Image (cartoon, helix red, strand yellow):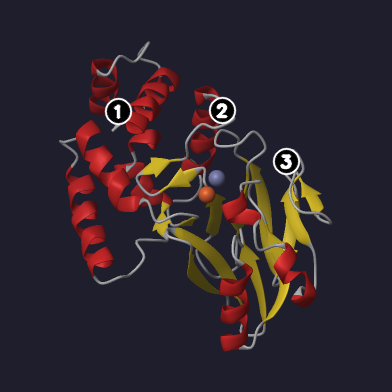
């Protein structure tokens, strides 16, 4: 049985951990201390580190975990991340904790960003998407183009609806405030927003989300929906196609 944990780090990061009661894998360990404490508390041995992209809030703890790591650091081939590491490209497959894991190319936030999809035999799939997809939003386009981000988000939106979406930041409430400006008529969005407000009031994470939820409420996955397109055009989108709509939404969100 695989257990999934979100370890809060810094002000709004999550370091995700999966474990089987003995061995653990962590994703994007920005802070080594947070991971050490979680491993100690549960008496787990760390057998792999997964890195989605090169930003320091995702890689800053890698070297500080080497002494207790029994296994590789897997990281995107197209980006500079702490060495030594096993370089991965989209399409590659791994086995972690006895479970199959697929590597997906999801450029946009950074040029070489990858995501990891764990597909346990008898549980819903688990997606570690770093800073590409957030609940209700998507990452800023630091290195990639709107077309790349649109293609990456489409890849993720096509995953099975029950896939658990493990984003690297707790940005949900601010994303949903923006989403409500884009789609004031989306009833599913309003219901999800009040649920997430309740979770945060209790200090609970809003994550993981699911692909099914994101398809219903995330404007960046809904660039072909009439209300989203109309809002983007009102904000000066250069065209009606999904890439132009996404570009306009992303710029609008940066200003909002
Ligand atoms: Zn980032
Ligand atoms: Fe980040």
Q: Nearer the viewer, mark 2 or mark 1?
A: 2
- Residue 82 x, y percent position in the rendering: 76, 53
Q: In what quadrant does ligand 1 lie?
A: top right
Please say if the residues under marks 1 and 3 sit with CB atoms less than 8 Å apart.
no
Circle 3 is placed at which residue position? 79
- Which residue corresponds to the image point at 73% horizontal and 49% vertical from the top-left? 81
Residue 98 shown left or right of residue 198 in the figure: right
Q: Which of 197 and 81 is in front in this view?
A: 81
* Residue ID at (49%, 29%): 150
Find residue 42 and report its horizontal and vertical position in percent: 58, 87
Say the numbered circle drawn on residue 225. Answer: 1
Asked whether, in this view, residue 206 is left or right of residue 186, the answer is: right
Disc assigned to residue 148: 2
Label 1, label 3: how far apart the Cα atoms are = 34 Å
- Label 1 Cα crowd, 10 Å radius (few <14 / some 14-19 / many 20+): few
| Label 3 crowd bin: few (<14), some (14–19), many (20+), radius 10 Å | some
Horizontal relation, residue 4 to residue 65: left or right: left
Locate the N terminus and report the quarter of the image it occupies.
bottom right
N-terminal-most mark, 2 or 1: 2
Of the image marks 1 and 3, the number of the one nearer the N terminus: 3
Q: How far apart are marks 3 and 2 (CA)?
A: 16 Å
238 in relation to 151, above or below: above
Q: Is mark 3 on a helix, strand or loop?
A: loop
Q: Position of residue 246 (x, y in %)?
A: 40, 26
Q: Which element is circle 1 on?
A: loop
- SS type, badge 2: helix
Residue occupying image coordinates x 70% and y 63%: 49
Residue 169: x, y in percent? Answer: 45, 54
Find out whether the residues at labels 2 and 1 contact each other: C-beta distance under 8 Å: no
């Amino acid at each position: 049985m695989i257990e999934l944990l979100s370890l809060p780090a810094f002000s709004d990061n999550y370091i995700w951990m999966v474990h089987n009661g003995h061995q653990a894998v962590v994703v994007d360990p920005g802070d080594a201390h947070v991971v050490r404490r979680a491993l100690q508390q549960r008496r787990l041995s760390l057998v792999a580190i997964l890195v989605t992209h090169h930003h320091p809030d995702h890689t800053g703890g890698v070297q500080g975990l080497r002494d207790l790591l029994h296994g590789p650091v897997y990281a995107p081939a197209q980006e500079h991340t702490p060495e030594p590491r096993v370089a991965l490209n989209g399409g590659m497959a791994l086995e972690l904790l006895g479970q199959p894991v697929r590597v997906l190319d999801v450029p946009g936030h950074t040029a070489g960003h990858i995501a990891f999809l764990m597909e346990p035999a008898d549980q819903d799939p688990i997606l570690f998407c770093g800073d590409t997809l957030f609940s209700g939003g998507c990452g800023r386009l630091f290195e990639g183009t709107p077309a790349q981000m649109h293609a990456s988000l489409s890849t993720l939106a096509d995953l099975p609806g029950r896939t658990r979406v493990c984003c690297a930041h707790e940005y949900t409430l601010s994303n949903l405030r923006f989403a409500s400006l884009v789609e004031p008529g989306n009833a599913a969005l309003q219901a999800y927003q009040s649920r997430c407000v309740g979770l945060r009031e209790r200090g609970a994470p809003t994550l993981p989300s699911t692909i099914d939820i994101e398809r219903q409420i995330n404007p960046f996955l809904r660039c072909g929906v009439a209300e989203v397109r109309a809002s983007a055009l009102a904000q000066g989108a250069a065209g009606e196609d999904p890439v132009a709509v996404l570009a306009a939404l992303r710029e609008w969100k940066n200003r909002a």
